[in-house]
Amino acid sequence: MYLGFVVTKPVAAFLTVSTGPGGTVSWAFIPAYSLIIIHIVLYMVGKRKEQQYTIVNKYYLIYLVLLGLFAISFQNASEHYGWYWNPELDAPGYVDTWTHITSPWLLGALLVPLALERFLGWDRKFMWVFMFAVLAIIALGWEIGETIDVQVRPETATYFNYPMDSLKDMIMGAGIGTVLSCWIYERLVMDLGERA
């Protein structure tokens, strides 16, 4: 079903995102793709000038492009097919779990190379702590937004913020998103860079 959606509706798959309370992240694909392009440009300019503007390598850039395309199209396929909710069980759908992982994973993967923790004077090894803090704050903000949306517009609220959804955002979003983004970054950039 996912592949069929991507092949038959590529524009809807890769160039739109419609999710969140009141479509709050309708344009999320633009900053995601923009950050990927910024990483690629900074890498190419830095290579020419022999400067390191963003800490990436060609393997990581390929991974970022593929992850960006997959995470955004997977989110859109989930919205298109209604995979978030299983009406037969009157419970969250199986894919709902995976979308709680893929979105923060992409966000973490986009932010890790910027080494923002250096502005706090932290060593690079503390990127895991910094990334978890960033993703946890975003997940908490998301949950607060969903809760307010249900309170303000009970009849037309896009999402019902049930307790398990909050746990998914905090545990899978912040926790698993941090582990995936940081661990893969270390393998593709740190380990491969040292070997090279």
Image (spheres, rainbow, N blue to C red):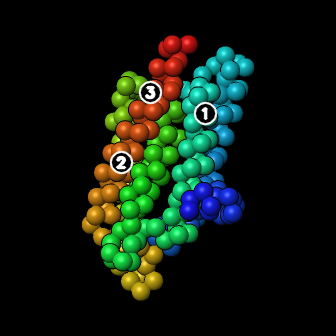
Between the residue at mark 3 and the residue at mark 1, the CA separation in whole angstroms equals 13 Å
Residue 174 is tagged as 2
Above or below: residue 86 compared with residue 71: below
Position of the N terminus by quadrant: bottom right
- The amino acid sitting under disc 3 is Glu
Between the residue at mark 2 and the residue at mark 3, the CA separation in whole angstroms equals 18 Å
- Residue 26 is situated, as x and y percent measured from the top left of the image, at 58, 65
Question: Mark 1 or mark 3, which is nearer the start of the sequence?
Answer: 1
Cβ–Cβ under 8 Å for marks 3 and 1: no
Residue wearing tag 3: 186
Cβ–Cβ under 8 Å for marks 2 and 3: no
Report if residue 147 is visible in the image. Answer: no
How many C-alpha atoms fall within 10 Å of the one at disc 2: few (<14), some, or many (≥20)? many
- Camera-near label (2 vs 3) is 3
- Residue 76 is situated, as x and y percent measured from the top left of the image, at 56, 62
Above or below: residue 168 compared with residue 190: below
Question: Mark 2 or mark 1, which is nearer the start of the sequence?
Answer: 1
Say which quarter of the image contains residue 89.
bottom left
Residue 61 is tagged as 1
- The amino acid sitting under disc 2 is Ala
Q: Secondary structure at mark 2?
A: helix
How many C-alpha atoms fall within 10 Å of the one at disc 3: few (<14), some, or many (≥20)? some
Position of the C terminus by quadrant: top right
Say which quarter of the image contains residue 61.
top right
- Residue 57 is situated, as x and y percent measured from the top left of the image, at 59, 25
Between the residue at mark 1 and the residue at mark 2, the CA separation in whole angstroms equals 23 Å
